[in-house]
Image (cartoon, rainbow, N blue to C red):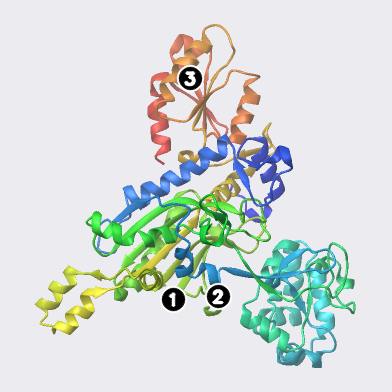
Amino acid sequence: MPDIDPANKSMEEIVALCKRRGFVYPASEIYGGINGFWDYGPLGTALKNNIRDHWWKQTVECPPIGPDGEPVSIVGLDSSIIQNPKVWEASGHVGGFNDPMTMYKECKKLLRADHVWYVFYGNPDEIGKYGEDLTGQGVDVRSFFSDVFALEQLPPDERQRIINEDANLKQALGNTESLPFLIKKAVLAGSKEEAFEAAEFSSKQRKAIEKHGAKPLTTYPLMVPDRAWDDGGSLCPNCESRDSLTEPRQFNLMFESYAGAIQSAENKVYLRPETAQGIFLNYKNVVDTMRVKMPFGIAQVGKSFRNEVTPRNFIFRSREFEQMEMEWFCAPDDSPKWYDFWKHERMRWWESLGVSKSNLRFRDHDEDELAHYSKMCVDIEYKYPFTAPGYGELEGVAHRGCYDLTQHQTHSKQKMEYFDQERQVKGQKAGLSKDEINAQSKYIPNVIEPASGLTRGVLVLLTEAYTPDESRASKVYMKFKPKFAPIKAGVFPLVNKDGMPEVAQKLYMGLREKFACQLDAKQSIGKRYARMDEAGTPYCFTIDGETLTGGTVTVRDRDSQSQERINIDKVEAFLDEKMGE
């Protein structure tokens, strides 16, 4: 069966299977749950650990081959979740890790100010310079936006067909410079929620929009086009009060706690919002104790916490999540080469997990969306069901320059400079002056950061593997690449008698030392296959009458459902070969 486009997969059905088969559960479910937190069940934990272990193996234990044909040097770290609060002042998180928040005065509902949908009211003359391209094309602006709202209701293929057939609409949507709230992305989004997310603005865009007379409107009216042009401004989706939004104010995303017996300002600490700072804090320790030399990397896997105002899309955006981050330290003039190297190396790694190339892409950050510390950044994006036909972030590869180490040097008064002996020797051989040699051999390293969400990786593999198939009893199977499947093999006695359970038990006991296996003797063989299909188990071995007489077992392939007989003594070698593919 050919791979299915994520756009044609149901997020609701994927979430339901995750609960039914023990991949992901709502946290604290018996008490009604808690928004933004998830528990990983037995299969989800195994899947997550398989991804994590593969990343650690490919990053730390057997790192990739660098541009010079030699393996790069990367060491591992596990830093504390809670650090001295001065760390987050130095990194800029205390002062700058904020979202602008606004609130409806009547019902006290909070929402992000940059998630407010801006719509221009009145006639085209009031739109200012942003409407010039539209009016210049002879487009009636009010009618145009009404059409846009109507388009949002349609399936993606139908929306695109109408846009392609309407020359004015297609031309207008093609010119995003004339559309300050990025209506093109909203129209092409796959759902109301993603239309909402597509309307995120930079502060520069928001100021420009407000300057030209925009009024705020929440995304709720997107689903009710006739209300979109009502007088009265913003409409609360809860209480339907109007013009009740407060002025935006900053909301820090870090979780606060206290270290010690007294809850005072002096004892305030934060749960880390990223694992990166723990690496920067230990940069000098690693240099002094591990005999590393430039360039080198420090890798870490661990939990991070962000008090997201609107956690959404299952485990895509949650308040507690796991990251796989690596900070690559290098000489400043070498950083462009390493940025390009890690960009392509990380894309190759995601493909090695069995993710289809057609569902992945690079997206370079625009200048106005770069983080304050970043010189350049590219996202590796995946086509999630809730973003399709668009894409959403999976991993970022950022050029952080020397910002972090410089900040920590300034705030801690500890030197973060690196003395590069090899560059000193090269400079001396080249006959450079003492000042030139010092300039080249003593520097604060630049940092390239490939940072990915481990829990987002779980979501990607769940989405990629989810394969509806009406021909099966289960109606769906999880098409994991065998080495990442939570259960590698099922072992079944055909019937629970005639010595078959004993043979199955012996085979299982031999395999379990090396592979995650499951012995199952309950219900019909068809129902057992169905359970394994939903768990994503690639191979099932059945012990039957021929096993007892001829020493062979039936092996069933999950994807093709084909069956063949192999000698029971060859089962381990069979799995060894398949797990390496």
Mark 3: which secondary structure?
strand
Separation of residues labelled 1 and 2 (CA atoms) = 11 Å
Separation of residues labelled 3 and 2 (CA atoms) = 58 Å
Q: Is residue 92 above or below residue 491?
A: below
How far across and how far down the image is residue 226, in percent?
89, 72
* Pointer 1 or 2: first along the chain: 2
How far across and how far down the image is residue 526, in percent?
64, 24
Task: Kindly identify which residue carries mark 1.
Answer: 375
Residue under the point 49% across and 27% down:
517
* Pointer 3 or 1: first along the chain: 1
Q: Amino acid at mark 2?
A: Glu
The answer, for residue 72, to whether it is visible in the render is no
Q: Quadrant of the C terminus?
A: top left
How far across and how far down the image is residue 22, in percent?
62, 36
How far across and how far down the image is residue 20, in percent?
67, 36
Residue under the point 47% across and 50% down:
302
Task: Kindly identify which residue carries mark 2.
Answer: 369
Q: Is residue 12 above or below residue 245?
A: above
The answer, for residue 408, to whether it is visible in the render is yes
Left or right: where does residue 71 sit relative to residue 561? left
Tell whether label 2 touches label 1 (CB within 8 Å). Answer: no
The total of numbered circles placed on residues is 3
Left or right: where does residue 169 sit relative to residue 447? right
Mark 2: which secondary structure?
helix
In the image, 164 versus 177, the foreground residue is 177
* Pointer 3 or 2: first along the chain: 2
Mark 1: which secondary structure?
loop
Residue under the point 70% across and 75% down:
248
Q: Amino acid at mark 3?
A: Val
Tell whether label 2 touches label 3 (CB within 8 Å). Answer: no
How many other residues sit within 10 Å of disc 2, few (<14), some (14-19) or many (≥20)?
some
